[in-house]
Image: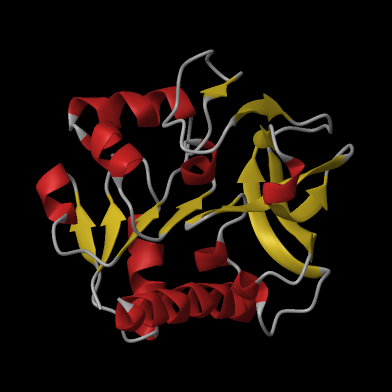
Amino acid sequence: MRIAVIDHGAGNLVSIVAALERLGIDPVVAAAPDALEATDAVILPGVGATGTAMARLNERGLDRALAAWPGPMLGICVGLQLLFDTSDEDGGSCLGVIPGTVRELAGRPLPHMGWNDVHHRGDPLFDGIPSGEPFYFVHSYAPVPEDPAVIIATSAHGGRFTAAVRSGNRIGVQFHPERSGTAGLRLLSNFVRACRQATHAA
């Protein structure tokens, strides 16, 4: 199975690639649309600001390619935020594949950094991971989906915020599974397993 990790110049690529390699995947680092050809799944990582990440995706033509991508996609941190319509961080447009906007967290200090409990609703992405398990966060913003039904997990920092979403085969997590130890590796394994099952079913 082939998984493409999107390189838009602001992602934690080394840690994500290393985590996938531990799961037996030899990922492709994709910096151009043609790298998505014959790809079974996409991981969209990110650190920093949504505006900077979107500018780099636009420059490389990856914005249109990702918006049109029909297969499984996992957004991580800023990669999750890029799945939505807009971000209050810079007022710019994002990929717009999940309706909603990205807003600043109510809690202080910002950024919200460190381990925090994640409470999930039993989505297959969290198979084998107890609700309330801690994951590692580094962020000041989180998405607010138009449809609350897409929220599959929450956490808290000055109030509840969206920690994970699923809209069809678009999935996103606000935390960093590649930096979240055993639980994070299990979550990535669940994503890989689901992608394998989808590939075999096709």
Q: Could you tell me which residue is drawn at 65 percent across and 59 percent down? A: 136
The quarter of the picture where residue 139 lies is top right
Q: Is residue 29 visible?
A: yes
Instruction: Report x, y in % for residue 26.
Output: 23, 77
> Which residue is nearer to you in this view: 25 or 39?
39
Query: In the image, is residue 47 above or below residue 14?
Result: above
> Which residue is nearer to you in this view: 13 or 55?
55
Extreme-front residue of the structure: 202
Q: Could you tell me which residue is drawn at 67 percent across and 49 percent down? A: 150
> Which residue is nearer to you in this view: 56 or 153?
153
Q: Is residue 32 visible?
A: no
Query: In the image, is residue 11 above or below residue 26?
Result: above
> Which residue is nearer to you in this view: 163 or 16?
163
Instruction: Report x, y in % for residue 10.
Output: 36, 40
Q: Could you tell me which residue is drawn at 65 percent across and 36 percent down? A: 143
Q: Is residue 104 left or right of residue 65?
A: right
Q: Is residue 65 left or right of residue 106?
A: left
Q: Could you tell me which residue is drawn at 78 percent across and 53 percent down? A: 154
Instruction: Report x, y in % for residue 177.
Output: 56, 65
Instruction: Report x, y in % for residue 39.
Output: 21, 64
